[in-house]
Amino acid sequence: MSVFRTLGEKPWLTPSGHDAVLTPVDPAAASRTALRFIMAIVGVLFFLFIITFLSRSQYPDFQALAGQPWQPFTDASRLWVNTGLLALASVALQLGLLGARRDRLNLAVAGISAGVFFSIAFLVAQMELWRYLQSLGYYMTGNPANSYFYLLTAVHGLHVMGGLIVLANVVFRVWYDDSVATLSQPLGLCTQYWHFLFAVWLVLFALLTSRAETINTLAALCGF
């Protein structure tokens, strides 16, 4: 029977030479699979952080960062600015990808450069936001909500920095090859990653600026 024949196969004894059938590996497909795997892991990581955030919010010492005039994210203008910077980075990389696909090197370089600039500006703005909160007395250990804010923004920032390292390799490829032909595929992966990080940030933004009533409702929906 075919089932027993399959179970009895010994792939490590596959004959070599003309009798062996080797399936070529598509590097582009492998890269896309790797990126999806990475985004799945990052997504699960932030999902677990959010679940623990909602669980911890049900303890009496948890004080939301928005809802009352004296709480820092009741006015979320600083977070909106940071969100705009990351959105511009994502849009810039999309324009760079468009230039690469149309064989327009100048547009590709301009898009990548703008994407790097706005990404770094986002990281600097996040650090400035940390300094602002500390100046108001919202230290990391002062309140569990404070701790989660620093944790979530730090982990997200580390993933942006990791993306910048990969993007630096793409920029080096442009300088080294002086051609758009090899740029489109890796830049497309970087652009997808930036869109993903922007989507993650929007979720964090909504969570961090939620009032205590909203957080309690979400926690109740999760069974906490």
Image (spheres, rainbow, N blue to C red):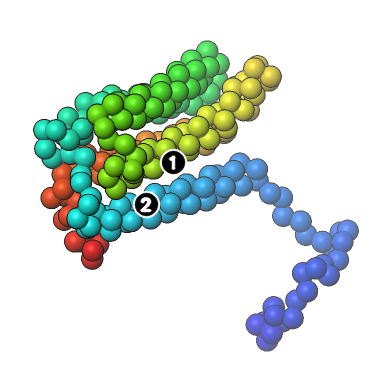
Residue beneath the point at 18% across and 39% down: 66
Q: Callout 2: few (<14), some (14-19), or many (20+) C-alpha neighbours within 10 Å? A: some
Three-letter amino acid code of the residue under disc 2: Phe
Residue 60 appears in the figure: yes
Check disc 1 and report the residue beneath it. 155
Check disc 2 and report the residue beneath it. 49
Kindly indicate the quadrant of the structure image that contains residue 224.
bottom left
Residue 17 locus on image (x, y percent)? 88, 58
User: With 87 as the anchor, is 223 left or right in this view?
Assistant: left
Residue 205 locus on image (x, y percent)? 28, 38
- For the residue pair 147 and 194, the one nearer the viewer reads as 147
Relative height, residue 108 to residue 138 (above, below):
above
Residue 145 locus on image (x, y percent)? 27, 45
Image quarter (top left, top right, bottom left or bottom right) of the N terminus? bottom right
Q: Residue furthest left?
A: 69
Three-letter amino acid code of the residue under disc 1: Val
Residue beneath the point at 59% across and 43% down: 31
